[in-house]
Image (tube, rainbow, N blue to C red):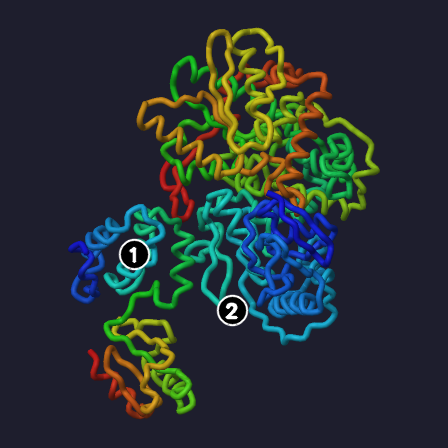
Amino acid sequence: MMIKATINKIEVEVEEGTTILEAARIVGFKIPTLCYNPDLKPEGSCGICVVEVEGAPAMKRACMTRLERGWKVHTNTAKVRKARKEIVELILSNHEMDCLVCVKNQSCELQHVASLVGINTLTYPRIEKKWAVDTTSPSIIRDQNKCILCGRCIQICSNIQTVNALTLDQRGFNTQISDAFNEGMGNSVCVNCGQCTVYCPVGALYEKSHTDKVWEALNDPDKHVVVQEAPAVRAMLGEEFGMETGTLVSGKMHAALRRMKFDAVFDTNFTADLTILEEGTEVVGRIKANKNIPLITSCSPGWVKFLETFYPHLIHLASTAKSPQAMFGTLSKTYYAELKGIPPEKIVSVSIMPCTAKKFEAERPELRSSGYQDVDYVLTTREIARMMKEAGIDLREMPDEPADDPLGEYTGAATIFGATGGVMEAALRSAYFLITGRELENIDILAVRGMTGIKEMEINIDGLALKVAVAHGLGNARILLDKVSAQLANEGKSEYHIIEVMACPGGCVGGGGQPWGSDMARRARRNETLFAEDRSLPLRRSHQNPSITAIYEKFLGHPNSEKSHHLLHTHYFKRSPVDGKVVSE
Amino acid sequence: MSDTDTNHECVCAQLSEEELYPRLELIIEEHRNKPHELIMALHKAQNLFGYLPRKVQQMVAEGLKVSLNEIYGVITFYSFFSTVPKGRHSVKVCLGTACYVRGGQQTLEKVGKELGAKVGDTTEDRRYSLDVVRCIGACGLAPAMLVDDDVYGRVKSTKIMEILDQYK
């Protein structure tokens, strides 16, 4: 039902249930907000969006108040402006204001709001509390001195990801965001997905940076520094340089990295294709043997830790194939090292990921099948953008260049790994071939694409009816896994054969290492970018990648060979749901 | 009211902590899979143990289907809940307005010094726990102090040890 009201004396007609904030935007008034985020349930914790409603005794919070019939709302009275200023000044009175050296400088929502409401003096005395910075996590830094207690991190972590790592600890002036028992995020159930860093409006949660170490390696003439870039990075790196959301920058990215003096610029997409061959062969084998069904994908390290922590009884279902990042790390220090005659200890393997959990994955002690830590340093999309800017590189001005051989060639099936459903689609394209020996004709598998939380489809491969499901965002994964768990317990088998899970909503394009302010709408647009690159490529099936054929001929033998198993497969651990630590093998 | 509901008096002084866990199971059974009854369950658990050790928090979390982070948030929010064991005797110094004006703060400092404990702490021998209260309705006797259920008025610094010594 439509209702009429006025905002600043301008008539507005909106659907019943529309908030004052949304209605005001329709008639051109942008009410400032801070704790509000379109992807989360409004909590009204900051109070910056207050407005006056004629006849109402107190001001109302526009983000969580529904507009009612006949209301006369004023968003810009002297009283409203004074209240907003006061709120921001109070926040600033105990905020560590070292903006120039803050990771969020110029992307900070508090900075933006302070300028929007016109803060030019600080009237309240400063109360500074020196909190210790939490550096216990391999992926995420938590700096309470910057926190404004908006609660967005808790909402994304508990309500959307259902990890429940964060909470409000203590009360009053002593309130802080912490993990249960306040022993540091590295000693908690945190799965390192980094969604908290994406939703934090200020510089209180951000990635543990590896940029200094990478600069050091690049400047060391004794080191041979190789780099890989995840599929999703090319769909958003451009945003950091002012390009439109969803601009594809694969070629420019390769060129920029070469100009930063990486010794070899490869591409994670190559090992994404390889993952499909290994995982595809694995799933075909499991279906034939009718064992460990459904196979669950294991490319997403946040998801893998979630599985190990909350579903330890299902870890045998995870694909043993390493993630593309990990496969690349191993091959850079074995296959590539042998080919080039470079001692592996001189190779520094760097990855550029949309992800904070990849930092955790790189440090997993079992991922050392080259004899060394397979991936040395992991940079998020945000970090590589900062490094490029430091190097004076404007991505927009770069030419398009391909990646280097032999770990750079890729197909369309690899590039869609970055979008939710992409791994499933790529796997089905190749599984069809592996089972029938013929090519799947219509390779655009639309049923597993898109932003729906859980997607299911059935595909008939020569009389074999495969049922597959795709979940993105850990809350959706939990729903799906609960169902699988119950089916296995009650019926001894699940209705699904293959399940793809990505920890982050939207898939890797929505990863915890992506540009700040990465909301769901933007994630959907970036997914489109990857499917567009897929369509534009001459080869769109992983098993058709000539470099993949070559690596099997020259080095690995065949998919799931003994050598493949040794180098490209891994195992998982049961973890404690209290502190996320390994409890047994 | 069920049998198990009737008596949750603290028995921590008589039984070892290990012996209390079967009783905790009974409490959890009353509230199983009822996350909205968290505070009630924690209240009873604290009465049983005298505080809320980590293992108790974990068991309550599992039984009521509440995540640990939420339990931790609730426990640290309400000053009633404690994660450190309580002593055999509770010493509470009043810092309500009247007591404060008449030297409650000095009383608190003196008690803290004598016991070697900060507010919220328990002495190493678990004999005393030190806390602050805001007005116990004994303003006429300010500054006042409470040891277990006994009220002491017009507390003089010199008398403090004498008072505390009575509680073994």
Amino acid at pointer 1: Ala
> Residue A442's spot in the image, x, y percent?
62, 13
> Residue A172's spot in the image, x, y percent?
49, 68
Q: How many marks?
A: 2
What is the quadrant of the C terminus of chain A in the image? top left
**Left or right: where does residue A572 sit relative to residue A550?**
left
> Residue B15's spot in the image, x, y percent?
17, 62
Q: Is residue A230 above or below residue A89?
A: above
| Residue A173 image label | 2
Which residue is painted at 33% across and 91% down in the image? B140
Task: For marks 1 and 2, give the one nearer the viewer.
Answer: 1
Q: Is residue A278 above or below residue B20?
A: above
Amino acid at pointer 2: Phe
Label 2 secondary element? helix
Which residue is painted at 52% across and 19% down in the image? A280
Question: Residue at label 1?
Answer: B41
Chain where mark 1 sits: B
How far apart marks 1 and 2 lie (CA) works out to: 28 Å
How many C-alpha atoms fall within 10 Å of the one at disc 1: few (<14), some, or many (≥20)? many
Label 1 secondary element? helix
**Left or right: where does residue A286 sit relative to residue A429?**
left
Which residue is painted at 18% across and 60% down in the image? B6
